[in-house]
Image: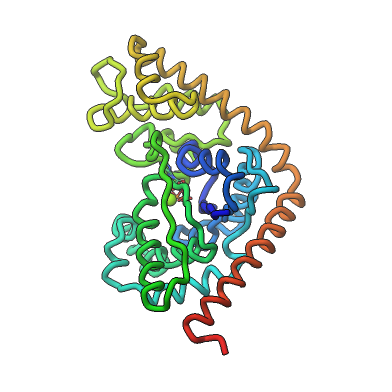
Amino acid sequence: MKTMITGIRPTGTITLANYIGGIKKFIEQQKEYKSLIFIADIHGLTTYIEPKEIRNNILDITALYLACGIDLEHTIIFQQGDVLEHCNLGFLISFQCSVGELSRMTQYKSKKLELAKTDKDMGLFIYPTLMAADILLYDASIVPVGEDQRTHIEKTRDLGERFNKVYGKTFELPEYQIPKIGAKIMNLQNPKVKMSKSAPKNDKGTIFILDDVEITKKKIMSAVTDNEGKIYFDPERKPGISNLLSIMAVIDNLSIEEVSDKYKDYTYKDFKIEVADKVSKFILNIQDKFYKYRNDEDYLKKVLKEGANKARKLASKKMDEVRKTIGLKL
Ligand code: ATP
Ligand code: MG
């Protein structure tokens, strides 16, 4: 059976974009693969967050994944930092990599300016090598992610391939799986930038799954659109409307063509009312289940601990193999 893995940083609470980009497909396919989800707590440290808040985010995310439908019979969920092999392999992978190529990674370039102010950008710089390790460590074949992670998965393949060339076939090379619809959900207030969970909590353009649905409805009703007054899909010219069409398509399980056709004669206001209604029903259903899990912290901690134990077994076996391959194991 092939392996599927995906990760999420505990840098905030899950957004609708995270669900659409990474979670939905994972849940649908979890029984077809050996499935792993890790909470990327170490990657999360590239953004400073109060320790207390990180702990809370980890528990929230675990409860949210359970509420969204991960099945612990089929899926291992764990914290990256609980399985030290991630960092160990990340270091070894860095030997396959050049400073130049890491400095050209889009994420590094885009966040560097912000981090340069603090003079602490090394973690962000080596992010791709740790991410490659996260995936190669489990010989994962499939990685469901949003569009923003495409180059990171490509880099993971490159680095794995280089390692295989030097030492002989050691790692399976992963493929990304980017959803056809909603690969990049945009901020509702600024549809030129992607929706991100590390946005401020009061950001009007970000739909947090745990927000009160009345707030979510308001955010959708005030989403930025355009002056044309016609509903059709054209992300270049109509980023706001196209974003809402993508969201609607995913929530309603329709194609973009079907959704565009269904709403073509609506006014923007009436269309937004429909989006707000569908999205809030969807979210309320998840929230209902979320609170049942979230109220039992002991259970959540137990789930993560058991997950880490299972992941560690796989990871330590692979690390042994890697250490042997490169000559470190006597
Ligand atoms: P942060 O701002 O802290 O990086 P994020 O919202 O980008 O938060 P991540 O934890 O980095 O979330 O990524 C989790 C998953 O969500 C990844 O698979 C990522 O590709 C996906 N994802 C993130 N943003 C979007 C988006 N706007 N549209 C679709 N998928 C997304
Ligand atoms: Mg991100």
Judge by depth and name the residue closer to the eye, 203 or 279: 279
User: Which image quarter holds the C terminus?
Assistant: bottom right
Which residue: 64% across, 54% down?
A: 76
Please identify the quarter of the rendering in which residue 315 is found.
bottom right
Which residue: 52% across, 37% down?
A: 208
Count of marks placed on residues: 0
Please identify the quarter of the rendering in which residue 227 is found.
top left
| Applied colour scheme | rainbow
Which residue: 63% across, 50% down?
A: 75
Q: Is residue 227 left or right of residue 322?
A: left
Q: Position of residue 81 (x, y in %)?
A: 58, 65
Judge by depth and name the residue closer to the eye, 262 or 163: 163
Residue 86, relative to residue 12: is it above or below?
below
Q: Position of residue 127 (x, y in %)?
A: 42, 64
Which residue: 51% across, 52% down?
A: 6
Q: Is residue 117 left or right of residue 123?
A: left
- Regarding residue 120, the answer to whether it shows in the image is no
- Regarding residue 93, the answer to whether it shows in the image is yes
Residue at the farthest bottom position: 330
Residue 93, relative to residue 234: is it above or below?
below
Please identify the quarter of the rendering in which residue 169 is found.
bottom left
User: Which image quarter holds the N terminus?
Assistant: bottom right
